[in-house]
Amino acid sequence: MKKMIALLLAALMVLSMAACASKPAASTETPAASEPAAAAESDLAYVQDKGTLVIGITDFAPMDYQDESGEWVGFDADMAKAFAESLGVKAEFVEIVWDNKVLELDSKTIDCVWNGMTLTAEVTSAMECSNAYCNNAQVVIVPADKAADYQTVESVKDLTFAAEAGSAGETELNALGYNVTPVSAQSDALMEVAAGTSDAAVIDSLMAAAMVGEGTGYANLTYTCGLNSEEYGVGFRKGSDLAQKLNDFFKASYADGSMIETAETYGVQAAVIEQ
């Protein structure tokens, strides 16, 4: 009887040891099996595999606009091309409805939003954003012959405004409780003022410097007071590893002078933030 019990105990010990020995083999397979899934979630791998970085933009001089040959140029456009080249892919530009930018990203219609985008709380919560690279402000645009009357935020409170839908300008006007009509693009907001259908517009200061005043297509318009101060960043899909790649690219291009050189081409060097 004692011999039988001993044999049973021995058998149980052998089975127990065999089971324990098999556990490490099973656990080592789990990370290996998860690696392809992790790689598939990499935006960098996705972009490099298809060979293009699709950039969501609007017509927004001096950041993104078309030259006489139809090529997209501007400070943002040129930097985007250089970044795409550093990844070994081509830059492809797609005009988007600004209010739909997060939807376009998440559906993979585009890979990033690179268009003088203000880093608001709404933007940073919905996208994986780069470090800030440019300073900016939202400024009021009015007919030049009325500018003397509208030099403060308080003085413009009774005006009717036009602003791009989903823009930082529209957000600021809504926060102030001012009367604003959303339009499709910042350039459309300028057209509203030029046509007299809106008293004023609110657009980015960098765009205002390039688009209104003497020597521009809107020589009879000017900018007066600023509503805020803000910073530009580039947005990727939430969790995207491309944001850190762009931060590294910004740091390197600032250090070697190419970022400032590109900015000087479009007259925005004073707005560039040190990386």
Image (cartoon, rainbow, N blue to C red):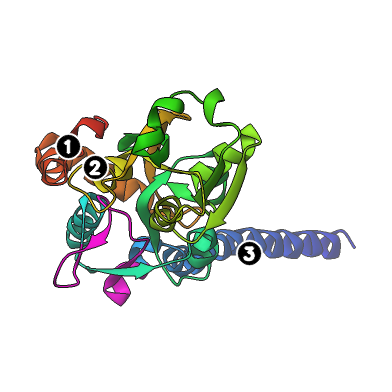
Q: Are marks 1 and 2 in contact (CB under 8 Å)?
A: yes
Helix or strand or loop: what does disc 3 sit on?
A: helix
Q: Looking at the figure, which quarter contains the C terminus?
A: top left
Q: CA distance from mark 1 to mark 3?
A: 60 Å
Q: Amino acid at mark 2?
A: Phe
- The residue depicted at 34 percent of the width and 37 percent of the height is 144
Helix or strand or loop: what does disc 1 sit on?
A: helix
Which image quadrant for residue 273?
Answer: top left
For the residue pair 19 and 235, the one nearer the viewer reads as 235
Q: Which residue is mark 1?
A: 254
Q: Amino acid at mark 3?
A: Ala
For the residue pair 166 and 207, the one nearer the viewer reads as 207
Q: Earlier in the sequence, mark 1 or mark 3?
A: 3
Q: Amino acid at mark 1?
A: Tyr
- The residue depicted at 43 percent of the width and 24 percent of the height is 151
Q: Which residue is most to the right?
A: 1
Residue 197 visible here: yes
Q: Which residue is mark 3?
A: 18
Q: On the rendered structure, is 236 left or right of 165?
A: left
- Give, as a single range, the part of the protein colored magenta: 46-72
